[in-house]
Amino acid sequence: MDMPVDENEVFRHVTLRICGNLDIEIAMNSCQEYMASIMPVEGMSLHLFSNDFLTVRTIAHVTRYHDAVKFDKVVHLSRKVRDNAHRWTKWLLDTVTIFDRNDSDPIAKAMTQFIKQPDSSSIVLRLRIEGNRLGILAVYAKGENQYTEKHSHYLSLLHDPFAIAMSNAIKHEAVINLKDQLTDDVQYLSKELLHITGEDVIGKDGGLKDVMRMVQQGDRVQIHYVKRFDGGPAIPARGSGRASSR
């Protein structure tokens, strides 16, 4: 006999776990551990459809399967899958669908292509992402007919925390990509600066050695100058050139 489940506790536990870490896969692993206590869970994944339904991108994927295969983050959808996906938008976006056998449905098959379990079943929650984009939370387990209407109800309670977590993961990924791009740009510009000024930089092997090293590495450089007593131009102090902490 199944123990009664407090719906408020389910929502609270999942919200704390899925929104508790900016690393979405760490957060989903934590959710998977808890959700396994209320339904069959051997893997979970978050997916985002493109607006034209030509591709679907996997935002995160966690699984207990040791034989899960590597997969492309962006998958081009077949016409059959695209036609099904378009029909999904006519439904309420916060509903849940149960697939008793994943390989019997084109959408479920596309979402679970990265597991070697043809006899698996899944339960899918459609997510309303800001900008009216269509996202999906897919939960799956070995064996057919693993999910019931009770599991569907539990999953329907979790639309908001998973939609928020998915939106945050997309934004966090964009920030990381921008940071990496800016780092590459700084390093490129630093190398171009060295190329323009040439090799003959006075003091590059002496007092400016540390400065030149940091410029080559793309570090932000702060140079302190020493005033000359003979009235000549100020010169960089020996040992200056530490990266600014600001």
Image (spheres, rainbow, N blue to C red):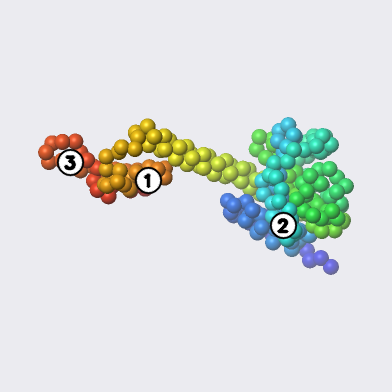
Residue under label 2 = 63
Question: Which tag, 3 or 2, sits closer to the chain's start?
Answer: 2
Which residue is the site of mark 3? Answer: 227
Residue located at (19% from left, 36% from top): 233
Circle 2: is it few (<14), some (14-19), or many (20+) Cα within 10 Å? some
Along the horizontal axis of the image, is 203 left or right of 71?
left
Residue 121 lies, with reference to residue 89, above or below; the image says: below
Tag 2: residue type? Thr
> From the image, which quarter does the C terminus lie in?
top left
Q: Vertical placement of 78 versus 15: above or below?
A: above
**Residue drawn 78% across the image and 48% down it:** 113
Helix, strand or loop at label 2? It is strand
Separation (CA) of disc 1 from disc 3: 24 Å
216 to the left or right of 109: left
Q: Hey, which residue is sitting farthest bottom in the picture?
A: 1
The disc, 1 or 3, on the residue closer to the chain's N-terminal end is: 1
Q: Residues within 10 Å of mark 1 (few under 14, many from 20)?
A: some
The residue singled out by tag 1 in the image is: 214
Left/right of residue 158 with respect to residue 211 in the rendered view: right
**In front: label 1 or label 3:** 1
Q: Secondary structure at mark 1?
A: helix
| Front residue of 95 and 52 | 52
Q: Residue at x 67, y 49 (%)?
A: 60
Q: Which of the two labelled residues, at mark 2 and mark 1, occupies the earlier sequence position?
A: 2
The vertical placement of 34 against 94, above or below, is below
